[in-house]
Amino acid sequence: MSDFKTIETRVLHVDSVEPDADAIRQAAETLRSGRLVAFPTETVYGLGANALDAEAIKHIYAAKRRPATDPVIAHIHHAEQLSQLAIDLPENVAALASAFWPGALTLVLKRAPGVPSNIATGRETVAVRMPSHPVARALLDAANLPVAAPSANTFTRPSATTAAHVLEDLNGRVDIVLDAGPTPIGLESTVLDLTGESPVVLRPGGVLLDDLRRVLPDVTLSPRYVATNTESGESAPGQMLKHYSPDATVLLFSGPVDAILAQMRATAGERSAQGQRVGVLIAEEDRIAFDGLPDVVALGPRDDFAAVGQGLFAALRTLDQAGVDTILVRDFGREGLGAALWDRLLRAAEGRVIRVE
Ligand code: TXA
Ligand code: MG
């Protein structure tokens, strides 16, 4: 599909708990005919296509302007659909599915014959997740297909957590957008690779490492942050450091809270004096330290990682739209959902961490 620009994108508003059956039916038919539908999940919006149709999957890569080196997650409605996608399931899959599905856990498994290899960019694996969002579930049920869906943003942009974000990046490149308001978690799923000797989390996300450990005591967290080169072929999928990036330069401040706030304030002052427009991403409690600066976004209370995570991608986009040159953001901690937050912040900052004592 070279001339995506000619597609007329239709936005269908649906209730986030009881989605309108007619809208779901239209979206399901669009998927069944090999076309693209953006839909909300509990994590972020996904850009969906029939996971069993190689041509439809190609449209995803083209629409996202994503290099065909980064594989896509297949979404399912019920556990029986797993056998359409994956073979040689390890024993622990049943326990993981019963503990975390539907939910924000993606399992990397051995790909079944017949599943298009471009869903996994040629790898012999496939990533599978059963989302819990009622709109995603209704769509998967009506389509009666596994649905391949990466996050519904242009490659390297912050993931879309509202339908407006989807349109910002993909208007004219997707057939239907199901708009059910902001997504509740706001950070993507946890990606767990079960194809190696021992289970490894490739991307921390909505399901917490501590919760996974209850089912899989030997699970380890191993996101390797590698160079930004998307073509290097050496990096494991999804591990390019440049990811979730706004246009502005992001600087991530880490260290004791009082020290990082003082350093952020000093840096904001210096850069403003140089004529830059500086955005700041902080916690509610930090506001007082940035009085008078125009582009300050408080994501939520300091220790409320759920609130901070929910608003992060939207805030990065808001500051971009305000036209800031630099975004200063604080480290919120790495415990619990903090692991996913830190991962997204580090990638948004492309590794630019300023450590303050
Ligand atoms: O929450 C989410 O996971 C969202 C919603 C829409 O479900 N999807 C999402 O997809 O974030 P995407 O494509 O933006 O990220 C998928 C992640 C990437 O890090 C990708 O590299 C990894 O999953 N992944 C997908 N298939 C894989 C595979 N076969 N082996 C290893 N990693 C895989
Ligand atoms: Mg993504």
Image: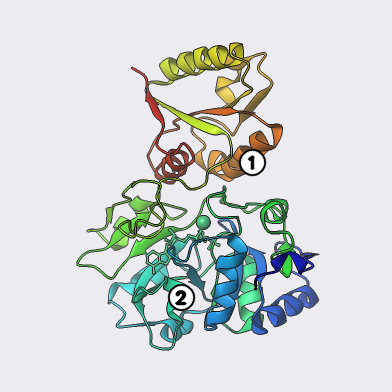
Q: Is residue 9 above or below residue 241?
A: below
Q: Is residue 282 visible?
A: no
* Viewer-side residue, 45 vs 247: 247
Residue 349 locus on image (x, y percent): 46, 36
Label 1 element class: helix
Residue 118, numbered circle: 2
* Viewer-side residue, 123 vs 289: 123
Residue 332 locus on image (x, y percent): 45, 32
Name which residue lies at 55% across and 38% down: 308
Which amino acid, by three-letter code, is at mark 1? Arg
Name which residue lies at 58% across and 44% down: 313
| 2 or 1: mark nearer the eye | 2
Q: Which residue is mark 1?
A: 317
Q: Is mark 2 within 8 Å of ligand 1?
A: no
Name which residue lies at 69% across and 37% down: 321
Name which residue lies at 33% across and 59% down: 236
